[in-house]
Image (cartoon, coloured by chain):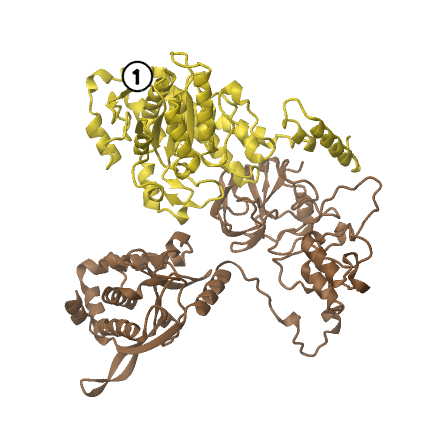
Amino acid sequence: MSRVKTFNLPDLGEGLTEGEILSWLVKVDDIIELNQPIVEVETAKAAVEIPAKWAGRVQAIFHPEGTTVEVGSPIISIDTDPDAGPLDDPQAPSAGGDLPTPSAASLAAVEVAPAEGAVEPGLIGGPAPGGRTAVLVGYGPRTTTAKRRPRKGAVPAQAGAAPAIPAQATTAPAVPAQVAPARAVPVPNGHAAGPATGVLAKPPVRKLARDLGVDLRALTGSGPLGSVTREDVQRAAAGAVAEPESVATTATAAASFGADREQRIPVKGVRKLTAENMSRSAFTAPHVTEFLTVDVTRAMKALDRLRGRREWREVRISPLLLVAKAVLLAVKRHPMVNSTWAGDEIVVKEYVNLGIAAATERGLIVPNVKDAGRLTLRELADALTDLVQTAKAGRTTPADMSGGTLTITNVGVFGVDSGTPILPPGESAILAFGAIREMPWVHKGKVRPRQVTTLGLSFDHRIIDGELGSKFLRDIGDFLSDPEAALLAWT
Amino acid sequence: MAKGDPGVSTRGRRAAPRSRKAAGADPDLVQLLTPEGERIDSVTGPDGTVYRADLTDDEYRGLYRDLVLVRKLDAEATALQRQGELGLWASLLGQEAAQVGSGRALRTQDMAFPTYREHGVLYCRGIDPIMPLGLFRGVDQGGWDPNEFKFNMYTIVIGAQTLHATGYAMGVTMDGRMGGDDGEAVIAYFGDGATSQGDVNEAFVWASVFNAPLVFFCQNNQYAISEPLERQTRVPLYQRAAGFGFPGVRVDGNDVLASYAVTRTALDNARHGQGPSLIEAYTYRMGAHTTSDDPTRYRIASEVEAWQAKDPIARMKAFLTKQQLVDDDFFAEVDEQARRESLHLRERVLAMPNPEPVTMFDHVYPNGSPLLDEQRATFNRYMDSFEGSAH
């Protein structure tokens, strides 16, 4: 057994197929102990730390942070006997940075060692046919092939031997050639000749093939393990027998507008979640958006005075703090805006979990300040600072993001004036806070340079009528144009 | 080895104020060892029963060793799951005292019905700790003989084992195996979530009206997966017993001495024919429900921290140190033993053989059946049809 062992991503939670590498807790060349946490992985069920299966020296790390890795793919290799001198293979990855590119030669030396008893050769993560494992940068050797024990006296290599089936690399971009268009051999009268045994296909697909008169045996499956999918059958039935796009051969020096100049980005993680939430919200809640432009010069001066106070010296103060306070005070005056449409009833919440949309490296996330209505201004300032820093550091937990009741999106930080924000699902109002600009403004009868901003409020018209939405927005504007007076008048 | 006197006689009865302080809002919590490691001589329960744990120094040390070992073995199993060697693991982290205390309170002849988390009780019954790992690795069905160890198979179905235990306990009565000091008592383990199950409530009814020699031991770890206790009950769980007609008591489940004393008393009552009782061991699941669960999605860090301060092992360690029951090497020696045993466990798990497929026919009937024999023969022929088959 090789002294370098490769650890494959296990199924961390009963039937999962993939996990996202959140962060590496070790780097190449680190000496690690048995059960020392090495990597944090997030699955559909949980974010967990994986402890090292062997003690030794980290030999190679196969996936950068942020990658989604399929269960069974190698993620790290460990030299289990680092004191025994250098490895035989001089090509073996060494102190080459956190993310070495394992060459084919080095991987061959690594001898992808199946974990004892857990992975058999031929299964996911085991040695691939051909004696070596192919590696793309950033993607582990993917060697999923059907392992079927040969039957005695069976016809060899039925329905295409396993090695002929292209490894289905769902994480790899642009794999058009791998979905080999199925070749249709239409059979008259809707009856395939004989049962299509030896071909992998799910029962509904078999029925579809029979109904459409497609002979499964004539198809090359594009599904897992080379199985024939519903799409394969439908394509075959439609006569879509176009040869594989021979882009490479037709490409000339002339500009092409084909797939080679398109980038395909898998939709997953935060992007996927955002897309689902936005679509769901946009097409279920009837949105109305209203705008209000406000002179916030006095409010900015008030913030300056606040900064000058001794007990606020250490506190990070931004205009967002005043906007948050304005929203919280306005919610008290119009509790209906802080509610959820629940089908046959409206749930009005007496607490405000104030969401703040944050652009992070991982995408848009909306953590919220829990029970923000009960916080003092100082506590609110601390909570906002904490929330933003946590989001920037990428440490926002799912708990931080759940249970939001009303959201502010600070589009002003991007230098734009306003927008028509889409409601987070389950919420009934969201406020867009635009950039604060110095503008000519009529002040006390004269045109003066004043600091002005635009507020955009989207609300769910099922719950909030134009009157309520307008009053709510008007109150936020009133506070921001004269916070002291609003505080005296309302609290 | 310094053998200090625990000084129990001078300490007097300070149970009520102590308990109230330790348990916050609940004066009815039976506690014999505070989170700070202060021992309380005796505590009077809500029904007037006096609980005390007068153990020998060796027994105190033994309980500590049990706690450390079951925690370490449990951590090793969790690590093995993360490394792809187990399909699933339900950690007992935080509940060691409730399990070790009640497990050590069992007498040899007593029968236990566990859930799937009672690794600590299993350990106390003398079963090889590798047994449940075979179950969760998927290479066997559990492996131990329930009759030999008087510890039933793990039950995954929530609360189902309380009915099995009730039936078993009624059988004990019918067989006349109770009534004296050598009588048999039965204990059924379950969690707070299970109290919402019909099975558990049916078991309460049957055990009550048939006066079964049964102790219902509920480890209230505050969460039924993600559902908090307040979604299970409007009254403290132990008070439910009154409605079914038997006594209930709440014990500090992070206090191994109280868990031991309360369980021992309840078992002795049962074996002497006094019928069933309910123990609510008030504790906290420090880890996830199982390795498939992410507790940070439904509970807040400050709550976990508050319970961290009530750690069952830390308080036992403080007690042993304060009472000078151990010398300096003791703790290191226990840690070393735990490390050794967990490493041993890991090696044996990795070496566990995959079962031959045909063994699935082995334990269906004790003496086989013609139909099954035929199926086995067919299956063997099928396996023989593969190349390289050993058959």
> Which residue in the structure is indicated by mark 1?
B54
Task: Output the chain of dot 1.
Answer: B
Query: Taking B44 as reference, is A343 left or right?
Result: right
Q: Residue at x 59, y 32 (%)?
A: B350
Image hue for chain B: yellow
Amino acid residing under circle 1: Asp
Q: Quadrant of residue B212?
A: top left
Give the image location of residue B361, x and y in percent. Answer: 67, 29
Q: Judging from the image, what secondary structure is the residue with disc 1 in? A: loop
Give the image location of residue B14, x and y in percent. Answer: 20, 24
Image hue for chain A: brown
Query: Crowdedness of circle 1 by 10 Å Cα count: few (<14), some, many (20+)?
Result: some
Q: Image quadrant for the C terminus of chain A?
A: bottom left
Q: Quadrant of residue B316?
A: top left
Q: Image quadrant for the N terminus of chain A?
A: top right
Give the image location of residue B373, x and y in percent. Answer: 72, 28
Residue at the extreme front of the image, as rendered: B209
Q: Count numbered badges in the picture.
A: 1
